[in-house]
Image (spheres, rainbow, N blue to C red):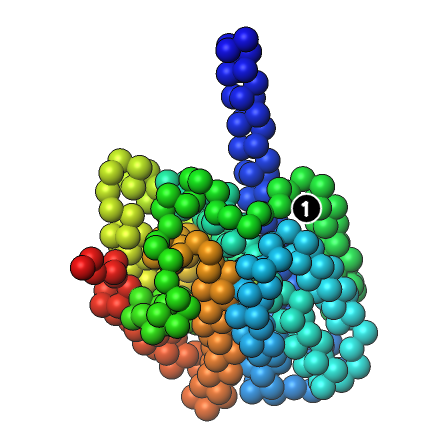
Amino acid sequence: MTITDSGGSARLRAKLGASIWIGVWLLALGCIIAYVDRVNLSFAVIDKDFKNFFQISNTERGLVNSAFFWSYAALQIPAGWVVDRYGAKYPLAICFAVWSGLTAFTAFTTGFETLFAVRLLLGVGEALMHPASMRWIRYHIGEQRRGIAIGIYMSGSKFGPAIGATLSALLIQSYGWRAMFLILGIAGLLWLLPWLVLAKNDGGTVAPAAAASSAPDAPMRTLLASPILLGVIIGTFSYMYFVYFCMTWMPAYLQEARGLSLSASGFYTTFSFAGMAVMSIIGGLAADWIIERGNDAILVRKAFTIAGFLLASTEVFSPLLQSLNLALIVSIFSLSGLGLATANYWALTQTLIPGNKTGRIVGIQNCAASVAGIVAPIITGWLVQHTGGYAAAMEMVLFFLACGIASYVFLVRAPSKA
């Protein structure tokens, strides 16, 4: 009897473990779809028919590329509260349906104002994606596997632009920009069925493995006043400034400054983000391996994060190189290198905060990321308009990456013990 019970328990644990990892992979797929729906506009705005229809300047291109992030940033903290209150599974499904429908509706926009409004609403629809996903992972995955879990999930935020770059360019060239938005929006809805059927719901308490690594609880006002949270905000903004520069302006840089075609710029953007996705998984897995062997989780994840920022800083050399091939190699290397930080800077936040405030803290962190999505395309557009090139825009990227390194060196530290 004891043997039978033991075997039954082992099978049950294996089944539950498999369902949890299915949930992680579904979240990664959902993240891919979310980022495809963000990056598709970056290729529409360099399409000749699109530009002729909307008659927009470089400054306006930066503005419309940022529209998504105005509402997305504003709703991150409320979104965190919603998932802390109601869980992740069903609120995420509702929001997924909303943003997929809005992506399809973009095909029917008739003017710049309508296009801007739809992108604002798209930000509303996607607002729950990261808070819900990070909460779901925190409630099901312990510290020693959290790096790879977040690495898999966050790889979706890199595979999304990678897939979206090629797919958007091909759909625009084959069918036009309107059909591109319509096809991508309708296709995205297919994700809902497996998520609703296969994903475990997250309960009201942190899973035992995750609870063991949770920071002690503290009032929200104490967390908001913490230098740790300030450092996380600065570091997240700096990381995402570079990502959103690449997502919204890299295709234009490759086409306008380097003379690549729409399809070629899509290919190289795809390659860069795919490299970042792979590195995010490798970085998370490597950090987990080192932590599992008894090394301090905070120091390990900080080291990987800072290394990723340093590798990303090489992007500043790209516009200075005469050789097209070297410039492309540097662009791919820098964005791929940043992938070392991806899983680890998110996992580091989860290590340093209480588990029962995951949604709200992730909301604050992702709000900082979203502000970068507003600022990066606007500043880049302004600099390109007024300097006639991309060198100054990439120097701005270097400045923010340096700020991010400083924040993780001096502010993001383990709380001192009395």
Quarter of the figure with residue 14: top right
- Which quadrant of the rendered structure holds the N terminus? top right
Decide which of 343, 276 is in the foreground and name it.
343
- The picture places residue 275, in percent across and down from the top left corner, at 45, 51
Decide which of 417, 399 is in the foreground and name it.
417
Badge 1 local density, few (<14 within 10 Å), some, or many (20+)?
Answer: some
Decide which of 180, 67 is in the foreground and name it.
67
Q: Mark 1: which amino acid? A: Trp
Please, what secondary structure does the residue beneath circle 1 have?
A: helix
Residue name at image x 71 percent, y 59 percent: 94
9 versus 73 height, above or below: above
* Outermost bottom residue: 386
Q: Which residue is mark 1?
A: 195
282 versus 51 height, above or below: above
Residue name at image x 46 percent, y 56 percent: 356
- The picture places residue 385, in percent across and down from the top left corner, at 50, 88
- Which quadrant of the rendered structure holds the C terminus? bottom left
In the image, taking residue 179 as reference, residue 397 lies left or right, namely left
- The picture places residue 117, in percent across and down from the top left corner, at 70, 80
Residue name at image x 60 percent, y 54 percent: 87
- The picture places residue 402, in percent across and down from the top left corner, at 29, 71
Q: Is residue 168 visible?
A: no
Q: Is residue 128 visible?
A: yes
In the image, taking residue 135 as reference, residue 39 lies left or right, namely right
